[in-house]
Image: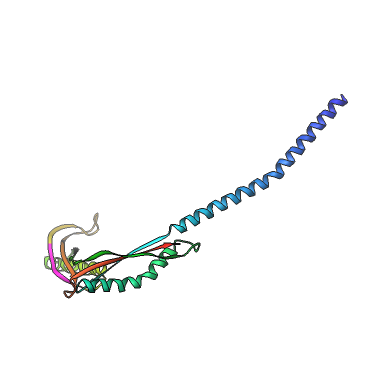
């Protein structure tokens, strides 16, 4: 009986010792897992940073091929810092960016007009107002889009032309209120850089992490 009791005490002592050793090893394993996870995330951040890139295409116009290339390179010089800044914003400060390449992406070519559209849909108006308003909006749209594309002043080359006019009646609040007459018009127009400019070209600037 005494020997059996002694055997049980020995077993319990061994079990307690093993459990204590296991508990002491767990914090070390947890810390190791945290360190491994932190290293993995840092490696991913660095890999993302090294893939950072910013590409900008700069368009300009000129009176001839030489003038176009001169103007577009002047404009590209002004965009270098912006390209680098955009690239650096992706790196989280881990690495820095530089201009990796700069090249003529569009050789001097003839300028193409830019189209614009206008839409007018109002109540208590006239057909004349509908047509004039949609045509004016189409011209403004064409000039704005042209300036955005060529980065220069533009002028209307084709006046606003109304392509459709419809008259219909509907309730002011769709489900309530009196029925009123509406005029709806759509128009198109086109614009191009000032007539002194005959050529357009583009330079592409690429900034990459290093």
Q: Quadrant of residue 172?
A: bottom left
Q: Position of residue 13 (x, y in %)?
A: 80, 35
Q: Quadrant of the image for the C terminus?
A: bottom left
Q: Position of residue 145 (x, y in %)?
A: 24, 66
Magenta stretch: give its range. 155-162
Q: Quadrant of residue 63?
A: bottom left
Q: Nearer the viewer, residue 183 or 14?
A: 14
Side (left or right) of 203 relative to 167: right
Q: How is the model colour-coded?
A: rainbow
Q: Quadrant of the image for the N terminus?
A: top right
Q: Give the main secondary structure of the magenta stretch.
A: strand
Q: Is residue 160 magenta?
A: yes
Please tell me whether residue 35 is drawn above or below residue 140 in the rendered image.
above
Q: Is residue 118 magenta?
A: no
What residue is at 50 percent from the left and 53 percent from the top? 44
What residue is at 60 percent from the left and 51 percent from the top? 35
Q: Is residue 96 visible?
A: yes
The count of marks equals: 0
Side (left or right) of 75 relative to 123: right
Side (left or right) of 159 relative to 41: left
User: What is the residue that sits farthest to the top in this orientation?
Assistant: 1
Q: Position of residue 8 (x, y in %)?
A: 81, 29
What residue is at 28 percent from the left and 71 percent from the top? 72
Q: Is residue 121 visible?
A: no
């Amino acid at each position: 009986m005494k020997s059996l009791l002694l055997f049980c005490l020995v077993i319990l002592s061994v079990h307690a010792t093993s459990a204590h050793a296991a508990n002491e090893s767990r914090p070390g394993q947890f810390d190791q897992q945290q360190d491994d996870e932190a290293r993995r995330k840092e490696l991913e951040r660095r890999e993302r940073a090294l893939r950072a890139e910013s590409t900008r295409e700069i368009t300009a116009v000129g009176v001839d091929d030489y003038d176009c290339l001169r103007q577009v390179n002047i404009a590209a010089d002004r965009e270098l810092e912006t390209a680098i800044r955009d690239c650096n914003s992706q790196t989280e400060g881990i690495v820095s960016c530089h201009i990796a390449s700069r090249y003529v992406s569009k050789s001097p070519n003839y300028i193409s007009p830019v189209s614009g559209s206008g839409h007018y849909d109002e109540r208590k108006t006239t057909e004349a107002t509908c047509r004039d308003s949609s045509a004016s909006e189409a011209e403004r749209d064409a000039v704005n889009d042209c300036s955005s594309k060529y980065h220069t002043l533009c002028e209307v080359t084709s006046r606003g032309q109304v392509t459709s006019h419809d008259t219909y009646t509907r309730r002011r609040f769709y489900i309530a209120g009196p029925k009123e007459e509406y005029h709806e018009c759509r128009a198109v127009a086109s614009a191009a850089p000032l007539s002194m400019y005959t050529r357009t070209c583009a330079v592409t600037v690429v900034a990459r992490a290093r």
